[in-house]
Amino acid sequence: MVLKILLGVLLTAVIIFGLGLPMSPHPQAWYELPVIPGLGEKARIIFFHVPTAWLSVVAFLTSMVYAIAYLRKRDLSYDIRSSAAAGLGFMFCILATLTGAVWAKFNWGSYWNWDPRETSIFVLLLIYGAYFSLRSAVETEEKRAALSSAYAIIAAVTVPFFIFIMPRIMTGLHPGAKGDPEGAGPVVEFKMSPNMRIIFFSSLVAFTLLFYWMFTLRVRTAQVEAHNHQRG
């Protein structure tokens, strides 16, 4: 109950302050957000786009940890957790893609430009889409768990490259790409005012708590489904 209340308060505050506070080229009050050069009002997407991308990484790595645990102990409860984390990672990856596409439309003129950042996240969606195809194609629980665990480990190894490395070693439109005159971008270099940082980190905490709540809920549901399947 405490987690749900804290989550509700944080998410509500992030939405209200992230979308509602006015932006000014020369902020004079604590409630005024500065205009980030080149982004303007579109900078508000940072409060939602970055946390969803961050959580996709957290979820995919969590899936890998439980996949390793399953291969070591052969306990199907770890496979349930690995699959649940991968599913949430896939969902947050889609949300990061959609919020990024909206930002791209306003900043670059089209929803999709095959920028290295866009391409890398698209490849990740394909990789984890194949993961769920693999799980649905194998009927035997133990075999499905073993194969998908091995796949989850291999897939997670590619995540840091596609999220953190590839977009920064290639030239592109996304902030932080190779050759970007602004450097690594406003998020990585924390080129944000104190009030923007508070909203940004509050959003990271809120979305992380959201992931944890959704993860535990999904695991409990999957365990009940597995128990009912065994009884049936």
Image (cartoon, grey):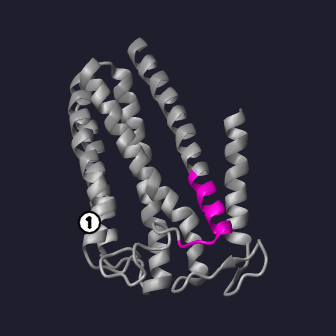
Dot 1 falls on a residue whose secondary structure is helix
Magenta span includes 154: no
In which quadrant of the rendered view does residue 167 lie?
Answer: bottom left
Q: Residue at x 30, y 70 (%)?
A: 168
- Provide the major secondary structure of the magenta segment: helix
Viewed as shown, does residue 167 lie left or right of 42? left
Quadrant location, the C terminus:
top left
Q: Amino acid at mark 1?
A: Met
Viewed as shown, does residue 178 lie left or right of 62? left
Quadrant location, the N terminus:
top right
Which x, y percent locates residue 72?
Answer: 25, 22
Which x, y percent locates residue 24?
Answer: 70, 84
Viewed as shown, does residue 114 lie left or right of 9? left
Whether 102 is drawn above or below 48: the answer is: below
Residue range corresponding to the magenta coloring: 191-204
Which x, y percent locates residue 43?
Answer: 57, 76
Q: Nearer the viewer, residue 41 or 223?
A: 41
Location of mark 1 (residue)? 166
Farthest residue to the right: give it: 29
Q: Does residue 119 appear in the picture of this structure?
A: no
Whether 217 is drawn above or below 28: the answer is: above
Q: Residue at x 77, y 72 (%)?
A: 31
Whether 27 is drawn above or below 61: the answer is: below
Q: Does residue 178 appear in the picture of this structure?
A: yes
Q: Nearer the viewer, residue 52 or 105?
A: 52
